[in-house]
Amino acid sequence: MFESDFSSEAYLNMQLLRFTTAGSVDDGKSTLIGRLLYDSKSIFEDQLEAVERDSIRRGNEQINLALLTDGLRAEREQGITIDVAYRYFATPLRKFIIADTPGHIQYTRNMVTGASTANLALILIDARNGVYEQTIRHSYIAHLLQIPHLIICVNKMDLMEFSESTFNQIREDFLAMSAKLSIPDLQFLPISALNGDNVVHPSANMPWYTGPTLLHLLETVDITSDLNRVNARFPVQYVIRPISDEFHDYRGYAGRVAGGSFSKGDQVVVLPGMKESTIESIDLFESSIPEALVSESVTIRLADDIDISRGDMIVKRGNLPSVNQEIDLMICWFNEKPLNPAGRYIIRHTSREAKCLIREIDFKMDINTLEHNRTDLTIGMNDIGKIRIKTTQALFFDSYFQNRITGSVVFVDEGTFETVGAGMII
């Protein structure tokens, strides 16, 4: 890797930004990521040499940076992205995980997978084509998944002679389309991924644009408020009971904080039994810490002996989640076999698992118009719709808009154990 300007200790303490790319086929997503990695000096020397050799073999006039992310043989042959490609890099200011997602309509499910944990989404628009179907589709999915930050990259500005009027028209068209969506932070950026204009370095070809480059936006976007730091939620994943002489009476509950924070001495409630207790200790490896924050994996010990097992949830008294067996949610279907209205599915929610029935299909979303289709209620692969389910045991949840962890579910086929859908609780 090129030499970096930061130590390993500084790297460990850096803030992590997860972002995803989206856009139609040939809008330049993989090229943009390749340019970002290349210009920020985040590529291993052997990777660069391999891409140079592959570019020469393919007859490219210059290095094909898209090959850095298109790892599958079929992707390189067709020049498209099929699967989600994850890439990692860092600058002196921040660490990044990139999910480069496909542009084809039939791979919409892959975009949902890649974007489900993202703080930010880059939506690419070809300056020659402007806003069209896939732009609307990907923007709606970003809204549905509650990605708080969106950067609209108007790419291939070099093919439109770096026209300011072209950029402004696309910006106006997107704003008109996105008026129906809730996007808290929206930025527009004119770029040429092929040549590197406004990616890492400011473009001399667009003096009319005086805003930040893409890398500057990625390094400075404020993500501190993206996680739910109010509603304390701790799904129990495992009960630690060593039964040894050294830890004879030790009983701890391991998991990951899904919301808010927990401190020693907090009064808590354990769901579903509604038993109350107090946090006696929060353990991390061989030591105890005074507080556990959202996204941290810890072990919690309580002052009272309570029957707790995997799938239960520890919450703070006076701040309880919803507890119910009938749940309304938006679902994105992944499987070639359509959603069966009379089918039985396994549902996985945090560390809890239950079986469920489909009670009702309310509507299917028309991605092109953002209208609710209540005539055709067949939810096939890549379709998005609103449904109601009933589970065999109660789930403890928040709405997806409040908490992306406790508000999300996964559907598994009871017969094949395939993951067939993902749901966002309303």
Image (cartoon, rainbow, N blue to C red):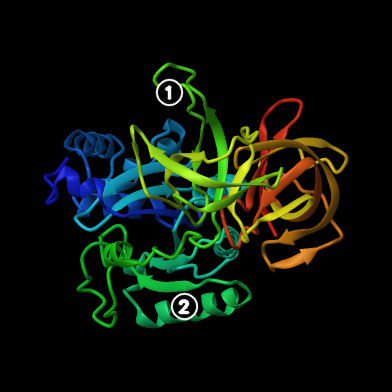
- On screen, residue 353 versus residue 242, left or right, reads right
Whole-percent x, y for residue 257 in the image: 49, 47
Which residue is located at x 23 percent, y 58 percent? Answer: 93
Relative to residue 53, is residue 316 depicted above or below? below
Relative to residue 412, is residue 376 depicted above or below? below
Viewer-side residue, 255 vs 170:
255
| Residue position for label 2 | 171
Which residue is located at x 28 percent, y 47 percent? Answer: 89
Look at label 1 and name its amino acid: Phe
Relative to residue 74, is residue 408 depicted above or below? below
Q: How many marks?
A: 2
Task: Report the Cα–Cα distance between label 1 and label 2.
Answer: 62 Å
Look at label 2 and name its amino acid: Arg
Viewer-side residue, 423 vs 382:
423
Q: Is residue 111 visible?
A: yes
Q: Residues within 10 Å of mark 2 (few under 14, many from 20)?
A: many
Q: Would you say the residues marked 1 and 2 are in contact, meaning their CB atoms lie under 8 Å apart? A: no
Whole-percent x, y for residue 235 in the image: 57, 43
| Residue position for label 1 | 247
Q: Is residue 336 visible?
A: no
Q: Secondary structure at mark 1?
A: loop
Q: Residues within 10 Å of mark 1 (few under 14, many from 20)?
A: few
| Residue 124 quadrant | bottom left
Whole-percent x, y for residue 195 in the image: 25, 60
Q: Nearer the viewer, mark 1 or mark 2?
A: 1
Which residue is located at x 28 percent, y 40 percent? Answer: 59
Q: Secondary structure at mark 2?
A: helix
